[in-house]
Amino acid sequence: MSFRSLNINMNLAILLLFMVFYKGSSTSGFNPTNVTARPDVVNIGAIFTFDSVIGKIAKLAITLAVEDVNSNPEILNGTKLTLKMQNTKSSDFLGIIEALQFMENDTVAIIGPQFSATAHVISHIADELQVPLLSFAATDPTLSPNQFPFLVRTTRSDLFEMAAVADLVGYYEWRDVIAIYVNDDFGRNAIAALGDKLSEKRCKISYKVPLSPKATKDEIRKALISVSSMESRIVILHIYTSWGLQVLTEAQSQMMMSSPYVWIATDWFSTIIDSDPSLPFTATDDIQGVLTLKMYTPESELKNKFKSRWSNLTSARRVNGSYFGLNTYGLYAYDSVWLLAHALDSFFSRGGNISFANDSNLHELRGGKLNLDALNMFNGGSQLLQSILEVNTTGLTGQIKFNPDGNLINPAFEVINVIGTGTRTIGYWSNSSGLSLDPPDMSQRKLHSNGSSTDTQRLYSVIWPGQTTQKPRGWVFPDNGRKLRIGVPNRVSYREFVGVKGTEFTGYCIDVFQAALNELPYGVPFNFIAFGDGKKNPENNELLHRIQIGEFDGVVGDITITTSRTKVVDFTQPYVESGLVVVAPIRKMNSSAWAFLRPFTPMMWGVTGIFFLVVGAVVWLLERRTNEDFRGRPRKQFVTIIWFSFSTLFFSQKEKTGSTLGRFVLIIWLFVVLILNSSYIASLTSILTVEQLSSPVKGIESLATGNDRIGFLKNSFAENYLTDELNIHKSRLVPLNSPEEYEKALKDGPNAGGVAAVIDERAYMELFLSVRCGYSIVGQEFTKMGWGFAFPRDSPLAIDMSTAVLKLSEKGDLQKIHDKWLMKSACSAEGAKQAVDRLPMSSFWGLFLLSGTACFLALVLHVLRMAHQYYKHYDSDCESSQAKRLRSFVSFVNKREEEVKSRTKRKRTEKASNRVVHDQDCSSIDGLDEIDCITFWEVGLLPWQRKVKILGFMVEQLAMSIVWLLVLMIFCNGLASNGASTTNVSTRPDVVNLGAIFSFDTIIGKVAKVAIEAAVKDVNSDPSVLGGTKMIVTMQDSNYSGLLGIIEALRFMEKDTIAIIGPQNAVTAHVISHIANELQVPLVSFSVTDPTLSALQFPFFVRSTQNDLYQMAAIAEMVDYYGWREVIALYVDDDHGRNGITALANMLAEKRCKISYKAPLVLDSNRDNITDVLVKVALTESRIIVLHAYGSWGPLVFDVAKYLGMMGTGYVWIATSWLSTLIDTASPLPSGMMDDMQGVLTLRMYTPETELKRKFVLRWSNLTSGQTSKGPIGLNAYGLYAYDTVNMTGVSGPMKFTPKKDLIRPAFEIINVIGTGIRTIGYWSNFSGLSVVRPETLYTKPPNHSNSSDKLYSVIWPGQTTQKPRGWVFPNNGRHLRIGVPKRVSFREFVSYTEGNDMFTGYSIDVFTAALNLLPYAVPYKLIPFGDGHKNPSVTELVHKIQTGEYDGAIGDIAIITNRTRMADFTQPYIESGLVVVAPVTPTLNSNPWAFLRPFNPMMWGVTAAFFLIVGTAVWILEHRHNDDFRGAPKKQFVTILWFSFSTWFFAHRENTVSTLGRLVLIVWLFVVLIINSSYTASLTSILTVQQLSSSIKGIHALLSSNAPIGYQQGSFARNYLVDELNVDKSRLVPLIMPDDYAKALKAGPHKGGVAAVIDERAYIELFLSSRCDFSVVGQEFTKTGWGFAFARDSPLAVDLSTALLKLSENGDLQRIHDKWLMRTPCASQGAKLQVDRLQLKSFWGLFVICGTACFLALAIYFCMMLHQFSKHNTEELVTTGSSRSTRVQTFLTFVDEKEEEVKSRSKRRQMERTSNRSASEDESMYNSKRRHLDQSPSSVSNVNSNHA
């Protein structure tokens, strides 16, 4: 070891010895001091109400704790606690007195008080004298260390209990609650905290019911009656234990403790149950089903021992059956004593001494009866307070340790359900894990191990009031006997949507509304009320305003959901989509010159041409032998074949066919030609007309950039949209009232006084175009809107009706109602493309009935005529036999008409004379008949004598009754007046003592002092005011001190003061009001604006200035007027600041705005405090700052804000009246101060300009002369109110109070600080809202609160700009927005992520980027992939990441569904995509060769054919007697019937009809045939050109009713929707990832391991189907959703991006992005038509086979007949000549070519020759025979010779 190292070691040793010596010296020096500092006794006090539920338990618990501490030598080392308890008897005044008494006894700490209101008062004493208050029961969350540093809460703050209640409300998905609470600090501040917590859950308090602290039974009954008339049934009960059960008992008597009510009681109820375990047995019916909370204290051995000890101790204390059950407050009271003991031990250990000193602030008040000398300040108070807050020990309630905010750690509550005769814990709540089934300590362990608590958000089942386990809906219609008043627009045009006729309301909207109501699980009583005069369409904005003002409870009609309207009312989900479209005249475009060739393929054209020639040749062969039309020279016959064949194409062939076979071939061919014609026409129609239309107007862009006039529907929102959003000049807009005006204006055009186009909603335009084919929608729909039903804000009916509308859509009822009212004609684009199925018989039976009736009537008339003619002309010739008469009649009918007429003519000549006589008789009879007819007619025309009875109403008795009533009223009024005058006489005192308490050296105080002195002087100098009595006002300076205010108020009571003017600030007013109430001395405050100082709690407090409730209402209207949504509240953290901001939050909520961030400032804020707060404010998004502070340090806030750059462009500062008061009082302000507040808006209490005020203002300078040593003292509004408080002359305006003790007509002036002064930009009053007109002017007019009447002058905003600030920015913290993007595996066209380069592409990405580019500011962001890339991630989990703060937003294919909207805010949807069903389909497009039979079903074909025969027969019967075309051989007539009847199908009949009846039948029948042909053509057109698809799955209902497996996209919301909403069993659901998986599963089907259908969003399915033609969407879209971008709740980016998306839609960029990524291939619905434009041969080969077969059979039969004739007539000649085969063929052809008559003539000649030859041969043979005979006999020869001779 070296010397150097040894030296170092020595030095270290010396240093260590020195340190030990020093420490020992210091320690030995401290010990003697510490021992001497510990006193033998320490005085502590306790203040609470002994006989209360909490007090009696706390008293015993505190006593036991003191005993236990004093008996434990380890805790205080021998020092004993001396406890003195005081009973406040629920009196705050007694609490004040007892607290002051404790201060006289050197008390170092006070346990208590019990009530929050008392704590607010005593805390001022504790703060002034620095004595810690340890309250075990004051749960008011506003009792904060900032305002009351010496108050220590040793129990749970109500802030956490209200968070638990809000979590319960959110858990059960209720939206609105009713709050019944005690109207004091305890109740109000807790409910305010509940409101804040509910707003975080998107819930709210819809109705507040304050009850006085000593509520009576009548007050409770009235309150409950008002509650029962509200919609909400969720009641939060936050009251006192002393009378809380009375509320439940009264509720039971009002039938409010049954379903559907929900009662949630705060821990006061569990405290009663714990204190009196017998309660559930004695009040079973009153409390059944109630939920209550109980402060959770973990189970421990220490707690169990104490509970056992408690039971033993309290068993002897029970009196009259009362119980001393240990409640939670008893545990906290016990622990409070031990907490104080540990703190005192630490205090003494640190050298603390117990010593007291006089309070210098009380020196000036010494004297009088109050012993102020005994009130000493505890010197060690601050040190003891610090020791209390540093304690960390374990007590009966668990770990006792405080957070930095002064609250106990680990707040938790039990959730208890009262059931049967006891209670049941259904779960727990803690601020770390929320709601859970596990106790909080166990949940805390799980939280640390799992890192998440989302899976623990659960409770056990509840038995609700009414003994039901079904969760109550939470609201009902008020049971007040009134029906809902539903306003309906009394439209003039488009009455298909809404039609009003008297009391009858009809139309599409009406039917949808009523159908939706029928879907609700409850009845809704309502009445329709027409709105409008019926002469013009009413303004929908005005109609909706009637909801806002309460005139209507809802509106039903064609109400478009727009942004401005959603600020007024709540809408349901839209039941019809109807954005703005452009309609313009259109013209047909000329297609290609050769377009007529396109319907058929070349093969089709060739085969058709060949068959024309073949059929022509066949008919020629069949007809030429018997028909002269087909004979002639070869050239002529060839031309005839060509002409005849092609003329059949037009059914114009002139050649008659006479042969049966020829007619048979021609009939079939004409049928084929008909089908070919129909198909050709249908295809060519599609080619030439579908989407071949043009217009000079291409869409909204070309229209907006032009100068042409534009039409719009008058009183619609389109005008404002076109002018405000699209900047179209109003001079271009032409209002139109009806579709007829639309048509006229469009026809006239812009050059003839009309318009170039009309802009209106799609729903109207589709109806307009359905019957007007000369116009069309051009361009795209440039707004995305819809129609909904409107209800008052936050009405639950809007939500339930939205669900009902969705159900109507799912069931198809919505479409049915649409079809009922809005079915479009063929002019409609949609209607023209509807597929036509096979036409059934039911479509045509009317036609057949018409035709059959005509035939029947014609036949009947014909038979009657025949019978008449027969009996007229043949009666004398008839035989008596019936058979002979019948044969004679048939023979007569068969005769020609000419024969009958000829015979009749002969008979007429014979009976000429008889006929003349007969005619004379008939003439005579006819004359009589005419006279009789006329007589009868005249008799029929006699009028009925109707007598009208006039009913008179007697009014004499009613008039007399009114007279007597008036007399009685006058008499009673006189008695009352006399009585009043007699009792008014009293002795006036000489002097009246008044007091005044305020802070003299303040902006308000120094002005008020002068004003009060002037007022007293004026009163005393005016004998007419008090009749000689003098007013003496003693003023005391409270110097901002609550204790001084208390002392001064008590001193005033010593001097018989009858009233006190003041105090100046709200904090002191809250304190002194308790003294005023107790001693019944009025407090009249000219400057306390705190709205919670109500008459209910403080009946002796009178506010002679304006209430801050109205000032906050004015600010809320300003925020809403400028379109801002969120504000930041910067306020002083005391009663004045907190309660004012609470009122502001309530007023903003009514405007759908909110306070996004609350920034409290300590009472005595300095620059450092303000800087710290403003730095936090600068990091928030909102730039609207409301500053509610004091004038003493308010300007410092602006100074710091300017230093931080927060007084520049983009910021908005709204200061309450403190700033205007400062400006009025200290003007002119220093230039530096004015520079700091440039652009600030502030409010000034408005006092009307009167002569009295002007005189006082002029007098003010004299009053303040000599008092301006500390600066100018200008007159402010508080000075006017202070003067009027004393004098009541009305310098500030009318001095009159409302029933709530507020001044009437509250109004404020709105001021803009600019340059070196101020400028008034408008006014606000509760009568008329915002206006540039002075309020007193508007009081003479009817009130008008509509938004249209709100107006302010322009503002110079911070940054010297006149452009209205947007109101928010991205926080300037250098951080990029973290935007989550799903890392998709399938359907990557929407979102795609490329590994390696972090590139995101796809439709959704492009839309997001394009929308961001339209924002007027830059958005720094970073896209972050979400998912593992192996499967599609859960989008719901992605959105949840926003809720947890991991992401700031999410973009992609994110469907907007209900549960996701609870986690984040969404933009407007940029694509519509509801759930649809996809199933395999079988195409039936023109692949069937027998498709031509499909237009008619078999029955239709049969009936049609039968009627052809019936009509043919009927015409034959009517015609054959006088028409040669219908006569001939029976066979010919039968063929004629067939030919004629079926030829009418093609209008090709050649037989003329000559009879009237025959022509009548034929006319009717041809009309029927025309309609049948047209229908056949239309149906066949559809079959051949529209793809017909069929599937076994018809839609969602068919799928649900089966048991087949269903596919869905993995990661989508479809699975939860199917399981939760449609109750589909999970086992049926098959997750699929890729589109190929879809196709594979669908092709396999349910029987081969696949699925019957796939359910997914339409956007995915359209992309899937674009390349897969084997599947199709079946049924309707059964959910109405869309995709949007998600952001954190209340993020303004969601609003601005919604506007940007609308702009993308308007300028067409949204569609272009869609086409870029999602353009469909020809397999999609629009491309399928390309496949069927040209008709293939395979569609018609069946027809050609039929025609060919007919031709073949006819030819075969013909050739057989020819062969038979040829063999019959030419065989002998061929045999005789022995010609060769070729000769025979030539002979046969020659035979065939011969005319039938020539063949028959030649055959006849040959037959005659053969007969002649046969006869000659027979004669010759006979002669030869005879000759031989004669030769053989001589006699015969002689005979022969003789004969010859």
Image (cartoon, rainbow, N blue to C red):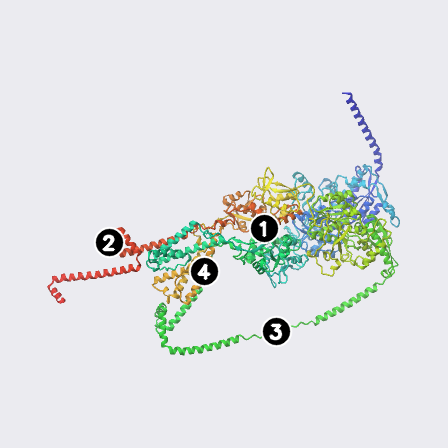
Nearest the camera: 1686 or 1697? 1697
Three-letter residue code for mark 3: Val
State the separation of the CA atoms marked 2 and 4: 58 Å
Q: Secondary structure at mark 2?
A: helix
Residue in front for this viewpoint, 671 or 86: 671
Residue with the mark numbered 3? 948
Whole-angstrom CA distance, mark 2 to mark 3, is: 112 Å
Nearer the N terminus, badge 4 or badge 3? 3
Task: Provide residue 1262's location: percent of width, then percent of height.
Answer: 85, 55
Spatial separation of the CA atoms under disc 1 and disc 3: 61 Å
Label 1, label 2: how many angstroms apart (C-alpha)?
92 Å
Can residue 1618 be seen by looking at this rendering?
A: no
Q: Of circles 4 and 3, which is in front?
A: 4
The reply, left or right, for residue 1247 in relation to residue 1701 is: right
- Specify the quadrant that holds the N terminus: top right
Horizontal arrangement in the rendering, residue 1460 relative to residue 1049 (left or right): left
Residue at image point 83% right, 34% down? 30
Q: Nearer the viewer, residue 1736 or 1413?
A: 1413
Disc 4 versus disc 1: nearer the observer? 4
Foreground: disc 2 or disc 3: 2
The residue that mark 4 highlights is 1570
